[in-house]
Amino acid sequence: MSTIALITGATAGIGKACAEKFASAKYNLIIAGRRSERLQDLKSALEKKEGIKVYPLCFDVQNRNEVFEAISNLPAAWKHIDILVNNAGLALGRDSFENASIDDWDTMMHTNVDGLLYVSKAVVPLMIENKKGHIINLGSIAGKEVYENGNVYCASKFAVDAITKSMRIDLLKYGIKVTGIHPGAVETEFSIVRFKGDDEKASAAYKGFTPLTAMDIADTIFYCATLPPHVCINDLVITCVQQAGTYYFYKNS
Ligand code: NDP
Ligand code: 8X3
């Protein structure tokens, strides 16, 4: 079996673009997400187009048992995971602290923090056994700098940043690389999810500037993943040219 990448959140946006990018370089893929039909469609499309093997895994990263069961039931050949892209995540709502929904907070923390921890905890022993691996965590510019009404989404991504840094230290002795990717605005389904299907609010989030595309991030992740064995990009913040922080945009009038 050639190089294997496990990508969470592969049913949309950045994760799907990563699947396409790694597939075009002939990696075999484990693609994960909750929407099984999308996983099956992506598997068929990539196997047909690229001649690679794709193993779909349908689970909710918030569910610890589902995560561990899915990873431990992988056939032996698929357990040689070289690259883990911890991408599954979401924002829900953009409300001031006093108005924000506690349910939204719980879902963001359970998905962005607990989910990333569960998947990593299930995969790291396999990487230790294989004596190599590369974990790439999707943080955000929101995990570097808080913004108004970003409260718990920002907190979840600050947690991802801290987990990424501490994983890198703890896994150093096994030769496992750990990279944090922190994008600014990327136009995906992210804002549709954040604004709960309100397309008008979602498209307003990208008005007046040219945001990053999912493939911009996939290209960056692929670059980090294909550097020589002795090189590790630890931390990478990436924005479009019209963004210079969580708050600073230069928008067209
Ligand atoms: P999308 O909404 O387009 O994709 C999110 C992916 O995450 C989907 O494949 C979804 O799959 C998966 N996902 C969400 N919740 C769960 C869950 N509970 N269990 C399993 N999978 C889940 O968003 P993006 O591609 O933009 O976001 C990907 C990552 O990038 C996220 O971590 C996000 O925070 C981060 N990011 C995004 C930015 C942006 O501006 N778009 C900027 C900075 C960081 P499914 O619904 O099928 O389960
Ligand atoms: C997504 C980027 O600025 O909408 O992580 O929080 S932002």
Image: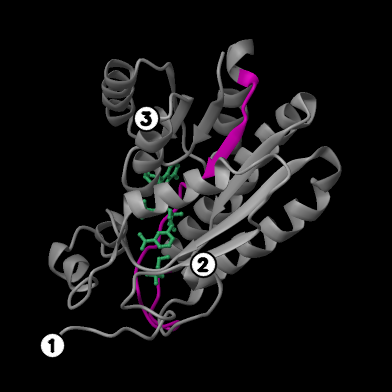
Residue located 32% across and 83% down the image: 249
Task: Name the residue furthest right.
Answer: 173
Instruction: List the residue tagged with mark 3.
Output: 24
Marks 2/3: CA distance?
25 Å
Left or right relative to 99: residue 140: right
Among numbered discs 2 and 3, the one appearing first in the sequence: 3
Q: Nearer the viewer, mark 3 or mark 1?
A: 3
Residue kind at label 2, given as amino acid type = Val
Instruction: List the residue tagged with mark 1.
Output: 253
**Residues in magenta, as a range:** 79-101
Q: Which mark is residue 234?
A: none
Ligand 1 within 8 Å of the CB at mark 2:
no
Q: Residue 87: image x %, image y %?
A: 48, 47
Marks 3/1: CA distance?
38 Å
Residue 45: image quadrant is top left
Magenta region, main secondary structure: loop
Q: Secondary structure at mark 1?
A: loop
Query: Label 1 neighbourhood size at 10 Å, few (<14), some (14-19), many (20+)?
Result: few
Q: Residue 41: image x %, image y %?
A: 26, 24
Residue 86: image quadrant is top right
Q: Secondary structure at mark 2?
A: strand
> Which of the pair 84/20 is nearer the observer?
20
Q: Secondary structure at mark 3?
A: helix
Q: Which mark is residue 237?
A: 2
Q: Residue 76: image x %, image y %?
A: 64, 11
Left or right relative to 235: residue 21: left
Q: Residue 68: image x %, image y %?
A: 62, 29
Residue located 20% across and 58% down the image: 197
> Which of the pair 120/177 is nearer the observer?
177
